[in-house]
């Protein structure tokens, strides 16, 4: 079962979206050779956004978290587990969403 499927079981009221966006400004600073320079399978840096969304009384409420420096092929496919970071990203996005819900007047 994927992380997204597991999330649906414990927070079925929250929609999670994961998006990848190429980051041409990211500069490789790792110990190995830059993954973009690999002649066989070049990988490009991306920013990943995980957004948690909920609708309360007809109002869409969202919050997002971000992770930069995620390498993947320029046009995908993208790692659906975000190199192992997806569970933490989802937890953080939901935590921020819950805080935002508490700050609003809209209650269930």
Image (tube, helix red, strand yellow):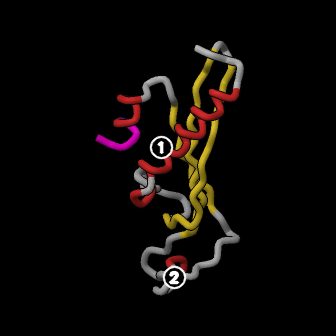
Residue bearing the label numbered 1? 91
- Comparing 62 with 41, the one in front is 62
Side (left or right) of 20 relative to 40: right
Identify the main secondary structure in magenta: helix
Mark 1 vs 2, N-terminal side = 2
Residue drawn at x 63%, y 27% as measured from the top left = 102
Task: Tell how many labels.
Answer: 2
- Comparing 30 with 11, the one in front is 11
User: Image quadrant for the N terminus?
Assistant: top left
**28 lies above or below 80:** below
- Residue 54 circle label: none
Residue 79 percent location from the top left of the image: 42, 56
**85 lies above or below 92:** below
Residue 45 percent location from the top left of the image: 57, 68
Mark 1 Cα-neighbour bin, 10 Å: few <14, some 14–19, many ≥20: some
Side (left or right) of 83 relative to 96: left
Residue drawn at x 62%, y 18% as measured from the top left = 56
Magenta-drawn segment: 1-5
Residue drawn at x 54%, y 59% as measured from the top left = 75
In the image, residue 3 lies in the stretch drawn in magenta: yes
Tell me if label 1 and label 2 are in contact, CB under 8 Å: no
User: Image quadrant for the C terminus?
Assistant: top right
Mark 2 Cα-neighbour bin, 10 Å: few <14, some 14–19, many ≥20: few
**68 lies above or below 34:** above
Residue drawn at x 50%, y 71% as measured from the top left = 43
Side (left or right) of 103 relative to 71: right
Q: Secondary structure at mark 1?
A: helix
Quadrant of res 68? bottom right
- Residue 30 circle label: 2
Distance of label 1 from label 2 (alpha carbons): 27 Å
């Amino acid at each position: 079962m994927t992380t997204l499927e597991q999330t649906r079981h414990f927070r079925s009221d929250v929609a999670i979206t994961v998006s990848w966006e190429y980051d041409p400004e990211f500069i490789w600073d790792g110990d190995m050779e830059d993954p973009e320079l690999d002649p066989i399978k070049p990988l490009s840096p991306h920013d990943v956004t995980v957004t948690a969304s909920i609708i309360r009384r007809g109002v869409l409420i969202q919050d997002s978290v971000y992770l930069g420096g995620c390498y993947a092929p320029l046009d995908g496919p993208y790692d659906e587990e975000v190199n192992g970071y997806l569970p933490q990203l989802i937890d953080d996005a939901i935590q921020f969403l819950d805080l935002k819900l508490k700050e609003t007047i809209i209650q269930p």
